[in-house]
Amino acid sequence: MHELSVGSVICQLDSEHLTFQDQQCGTTIRMALGYIPDLLRFLQWLDYRDYIRAFRVPTDDDCGLVATVSHGDQLFETAPVNLSLVGICADIDCDESLPVGLEVTVRLGLGEKETRLTGIVRRRQDANIGIEFDNCFKDGCLEPPETLRQIVAALETLWLRARAALGRQGAATPN
């Protein structure tokens, strides 16, 4: 039997069960080993739920970004929410077809630029899905594909121009 203490909780693993005992409140949870993958997916979701690893460029319908997500023979149209050099957040109407942990293919297009990336679904909240691109890091360094860099840079330019225009509209005019 293996045992680990985390605060007041003792975690025990035997050949059939994983058991959590909270010594402080006297609660015991016993889980069959077959449920450990579900527990790990949940813990992974907790790790990524509020964790953003890079600056994300907000997108809207007018920016021209086209994104699709596919898995096997399923293809999903998306409404991108934001994009970074390491991932995308998009609204995708797909029920439970894209669970957390699933490997997917993301196609991004902006004008003449187009790229395909593999990624992992890291977060889901209703139709809002966060996908981390898994081929953007090499030896711990950020090295996204050049086309992705170009698309993100073009979106940043559009976003900065729009913000600058808003600033000019709201600026006080001297009399």
Image: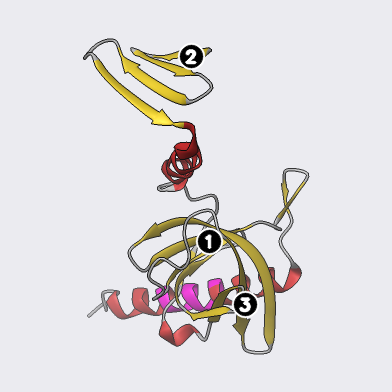
Residue 107 got which mark? Answer: 3
Alpha carbon of mark 2 to alpha carbon of mark 1: how far? 32 Å
Front of the two marks 3 and 2: 2
Residue 131 got which mark? Answer: 1
Kindly identify which residue carries mark 2. Answer: 4
The prevailing secondary structure element of the residues shown in magenta is helix
Q: Nearer the viewer, residue 115 or 99?
A: 99
Alpha carbon of mark 3 to alpha carbon of mark 2: how far? 43 Å
Quick one: label 2 or label 1, which is nearer the N terminus?
2
Residue 73 image offset from top left, x and y in percent: 60, 79
Figure check: 24 above or below 29: above
Q: Is residue 152 left or right of residue 17?
A: right
Q: Residue at x 51, y 79 (%)?
A: 158
Quick one: label 3 or label 2, which is nearer the N terminus?
2
Going by the numbered disc 2, the residue's amino acid type is: Leu
Q: Nearer the viewer, residue 105 or 153?
A: 105
- Residue 168's quadrant in the figure? bottom left
Going by the numbered disc 3, the residue's amino acid type is: Arg
Going by the numbered disc 1, the residue's amino acid type is: Ile
Figure check: 117 above or below 5: below
Q: In what element is the residue under mark 2?
A: strand
Magenta region: which residues? 156-163
Q: Residue furthest front?
A: 16
Q: Is residue 28 magenta?
A: no
Residue 155 image offset from top left, x and y in percent: 55, 75
Q: Residue at x 53, y 53 (%)?
A: 101
Q: Is residue 131 left or right of residue 23?
A: right
Figure check: 15 above or below 87: above
